[in-house]
Image (spheres, rainbow, N blue to C red):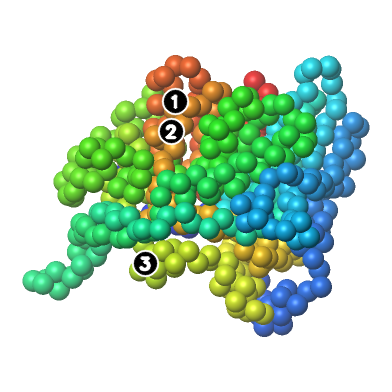
Amino acid sequence: MVTKSKDEDDKKIQIYQSNDDESENIRQKLVKEYSYKGYFKTWNSSKTLAEREYDILTTVSNILNLKKPNINVELIDTDIDYQTEYQKSLKDSKKEINTIHELSIDNKNNSSPGSHKEVVLLHGYGASLGLFYNNFEALSTLENTSVHVLDMLGFGLSSRPKFPKRKATEKTNFEYTFKKNIKDDETGEMKPTMVTENVKVKTSLEDVEVAENFFIDSLESWRKKKNIEKFTLIGHSLGGYLSSCYAMKYPERVTKLVLLSPVGLETSSFDLSKDKNDKKSTIKVSENDIDNAPDVQEEVPQDTHVNLSKIKKPGFLESDASGHVNVSPNMPSALRLFWKSELSPFTFVRKSFFLGPSVMKGWSFTRFMDLKDEVKILKMHDYCYACFAGKGSGEYCIPRILSPSILPYNPLLKRLPKAIQCDSLWVYGDSDWMNSSAGAAMCKKINELGKYKADFDIVSNAGHHMYLDNPKEFNSMILNFIQK
């Protein structure tokens, strides 16, 4: 069963890897040959992020070279009216204007008055629009449709204003349970044991709302400037969470919602929105409680059950049939400290100077190895390095939205089912480290209310970045949902 696996190695956050020998050989060759000279070349390159983006959109992807009748592709920067509180406080001489960067794909084939569609695609944490290189041409086939692939505010080539300061002045105490290997006094062997600890975090629901609004209000400002009335909204990971938040705050603007392995669904002991009398979020659990919990696959409808059965590996988090996480992941102490200190993982890349490209080469060479082309892989590596090494901004949202256990302070499962006002599609990879069981629980809740339909699907041979890992199946799934 997906939710009851005891294989802890399967529950780590890992990059999905295909078992392709050619890809693996190229990856190993790059890891071996990309040395100090390569690090320095990437770090010291005179190429701007915009130039690196252009490189990948004309080589890794061919989208900017696309020459098809009635299809226009261009890069656009749109000035928006949104400003943070800090920006509003600046004197006129120092006023900052924020811009949203996008790849615009406008297909005018079979156009007719009043039938034109709009699609907006949002990336995940730390990413940017270039990572959708496997999906651009498929999206360009949507007739009578404008597709807008955005860099969210604070990421990529969009403006990177100072992220809003915290509102909370006091720390909140959270009691949570996790499984830890502890040495047995009698046998001397390491034994998995349920441990309950307390963690204090300076946070509040207001902090969560401010962090969310940084992105969704800037997106709304962009929509107004573009004169877009309604659109299909697609978001991956953090972008999926924020797409859900946008759909709740501006429901009249979203015609369809597509969530690609979204973060932030589960309820847990880190839930700030829970009623003080709600014992479920604070109850102490035992190993027996977890083993006897109702399995998600036994609780969801048959079509969702069939798709859940396609999962090859359990997610990083495990939730019960209602989407509640009883046992948090055992995060390393250093990572928890890093999180509570609100340090960004990209700070380490920036502070490493010419060694920065080395810090991330393991990730990028593995992430893009299925390109099977050393030049293209290095172009994606250089592009991602430039994105990561840029001015810190939107990346600081994560400790405002999520706990050190990567569980949300204001879970979507508590908010979205009653607030959503459109049909939705929830998509995960079959080897996704994100919690697909919570997605199934979300669909169940939405469908039980009966107002709108929530579909749940799995992309085979894919991980968290299913749009990269199996683009053919992913593209077909998304296009079918948009067009139906």
Q: Nearer the viewer, residue 382 or 409?
A: 409
Cα separation, mark 3 vs mark 1, equals 36 Å
Q: For the C terminus, which image quadrant?
A: top right
Per the rendering, the mark at residue 415 is 2
Report the side of 265 relative to 215 (left or right). left
112 versus 351 height, above or below: above
Q: Indicate which disc, 3 or 1, sits on the residue closer to the N terminus.
A: 3
Residue shown at 68%/62% (left/top)? 387
Task: Give the percent coordinates (x, y) of residue 161.
Answer: 66, 58
Residue shown at 79%/52% (left/top)? 57
Element on which disc 3 rests: loop
Q: Indicate which disc, 2 or 3, sits on the residue closer to the N terminus.
A: 3
Element on which disc 2 rests: helix
Cα separation, mark 2 vs mark 3, equals 30 Å
Q: For the N terminus, which image quadrant?
A: top left
Dot in front, 3 or 1: 1
Q: Nearer the viewer, residue 7 or 290?
A: 290
Cα separation, mark 1 vs mark 2, equals 7 Å
Residue shown at 41%/43% (left/top)? 410
Can you identify the residue that label 3 sits on? 332
Report which quarter residue 290 is drawn in.
top left
Report the side of 158 relative to 445 (left or right). right
Q: Report if the CB atoms under discs 1 and 2 are less than 8 Å apart.
A: yes
Q: How many other residues sit within 10 Å of disc 1, few (<14), some (14-19) or many (≥20)?
A: some
Can you identify the residue that label 1 sits on? 418
Report the side of 287 relative to 372 (left or right). left
Give the residue type that dot 1 points to.
Lys
Give the residue type that dot 3 points to.
Pro
Element on which disc 1 rests: helix
Task: Give the percent coordinates (x, y) of residue 291.
Answer: 21, 44
